[in-house]
Amino acid sequence: MSDTLAFDIYGTLIDTQGITGMLEKHAGHNSGAFSLLWRQKQLEYSFRRGLMQLYRDFDVCTVQALDYALLTFGIFLSPAEKNELLEKYRALPVFEDVTESLEQSRKAGFRVFAFSNGKPSDIEQLLVHAGIREFFIDIISVDEVQSFKPDPAVYRHFLEKTASKPEHAWLVSSNPFDILGAVAVKMKAVWVQRSPSIIMDPWEFTPTLTVKKMDEMTAAIQSWKNRQGS
């Protein structure tokens, strides 16, 4: 049976900091800090809503996080300017190592899926814009469960939708909370540590594999499987 790969989207395949340049005209020298805060609050709001069982889709988390960042930096945007930023967020750039990695995964015979907090329509738009939609069998969204990562229900939903067993399913993500969520339900996990400044949370769970770049992933999985005799 071919192993299944669940690729996280935001921060793993798609660069959420790719909007920093557009923010410069609004936030100036604070554009980098603004972008980081926007992303931080976007995730925090998804965590809160998951715990509170007060689901609103990821677009709502993104908009409310943007509003928080604007208030923090004392920036006023017109509705048109705000909409322009939100549209840009639906067309973020892909990391440069992604296309080669996805091609390697396909050639290796893995079953490849997109797996995201985002709405299916938004993920479709992102992947098409990035020129990588062709690599994915399907898009699996937490929106179908009405919760967010790292709720175990969303990982189990992925397994069910893709007819995968945990021992033959790999999450590929650069987000430590996502890695922990997958390993907690017995999935395998590849952590893409895109920066040495990002550390894995010191919990009782650890990634199955850690790579520095996406294009190291397929070889790392194959090597691991050979060592396991699978």
Image (cartoon, grey):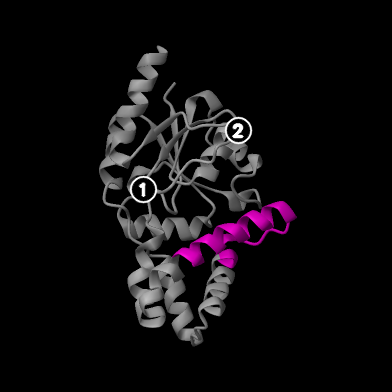
Q: Which residue appears at 40% of the width and 74% of the height? A: 30
State the residue in front, 199 or 172: 199
Q: Residues within 10 Å of mark 2 (few under 14, many from 20)?
A: some
Q: Is residue 104 left or right of residue 12?
A: left
Q: Position of residue 87 (x, y in %)?
A: 43, 72
Q: Bounds of the magenta span?
A: 36-61
Residue 230 visible from this viewpoint: no
Quickly name the residue at label 1: 195
Q: How many numbered marks, from 0 up?
A: 2
Quickly name the residue at label 2: 184
Residue type at mark 2? Ala
Is 60 inside the magenta-drawn segment? yes
Q: Which mark is residue 157?
A: none
Residue 154 vertical placement versus 189 (above, below): below
Q: Which residue appears at 42% of the width and 41% of the height? A: 137
The picture quadrant where one finds residue 90 is bottom left
